[in-house]
Image (spheres, grey):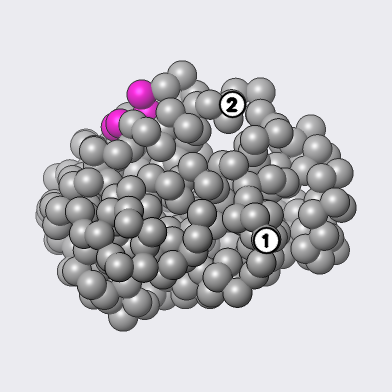
Amino acid sequence: MSRPDDSGGRSTAENAQLALLLEVAGTPKPGNVDRHRDLDDLRFEQFVAGAVGARDGLDRAADGDPVGAAFEQAVDGMSNQEGGNTQFGCLLLLVPLIRAAADGSLTPEGVRSVVESTTVDDAVGFYRAFEHVDVAVGDPPPEADELDVCRGSDAAEALRRRSLTLYDIMALSADPDGRIGDGNAREWVSGFERTFRAADRLLADEGPVGDRTARVFLDLLAEEPDTLVATNHGEATAREVSARAAAVDGDLDAAEGLADEFVEAGYNPGTTADITAAALFVALQRGLEV
């Protein structure tokens, strides 16, 4: 649980937990839970409880435990609230970033080294985490049916037989033929490119962190279609949601109306929120003041 000099006196795990809390408190984030809006099946306080519950897994990542085991424990703890899946994707990004930070190498190269060093056991831990919460995922291609994450622990045999590491699984999901890929998986295979860019924006921006968070969320959503929106509503809708976010152009007053509209329509850009949380962690580690 390293305590870097520019992190406000907080440990690495504390900054990760704070990032989860700041992400859900950022307002407005069109389509997502924030401190002014709940969804029909997810409430603000459940995200707060999820951040608290995830802490043991975050500590394990900071202490150098394997990525898969730390991630599974974080998800297990996160799920200890009535809303179900609040921050699965956030944790998938945070755990390797925490490992890199604890090693003193919170850089694209440092986190790339962490994820490329993952093992088959890490992949098994990742699959096991799906047994703790329901996660919206697209169907695997027919040739990869035995690797369907919905199989949970039952996929362990196939993972071991094929010697697939957790990084390998992310690479398979990052860029499927002809479809919008998994945005979180793309972060894993790109050195967390969008995460670090968004962290730079948070640090360069001014004003309350909640406002900075909302603006970064809008920028990220405008840049790329959201994976969760594409999974739940189709790729055309995901691209339209991104275009609507781009039209707001960072204006938080205009985004208030868009937020209400997206909540009413059920457009929930959860993957964009995941990257926002990851960017908050990096920014906190680099001196973002709260």
Nearer to the camera, 99 or 156: 99
Q: Position of residue 75 (x, y in %)?
A: 32, 37
Q: How many marks?
A: 2
For residue 171, say whether it is visible.
Answer: no
Name which residue lies at 70% across and 32% down: 37
Q: Tag 1: Cα neighbours inside 10 Å, few (<14), some, or many (≥20)?
A: few
For residue 257, say whether it is visible.
Answer: yes
Q: Tag 2: Cα neighbours inside 10 Å, few (<14), some, or many (≥20)?
A: some
Q: Is residue 275 left or right of residue 80?
A: right
Q: Which mark is residue 207?
A: 1
Give the mark nearest the N terminus, 2 or 1.
Answer: 2
The image quarter in which residue 3 lies: bottom left
- Mark 2 vs mark 1: in front: 1
At mark 2, the secondary structure is loop
Task: Provide the residue designation for mark 2.
Answer: 43
| Range covered by the magenta-colored residues | 76-80
Badge 1 amino acid: Gly
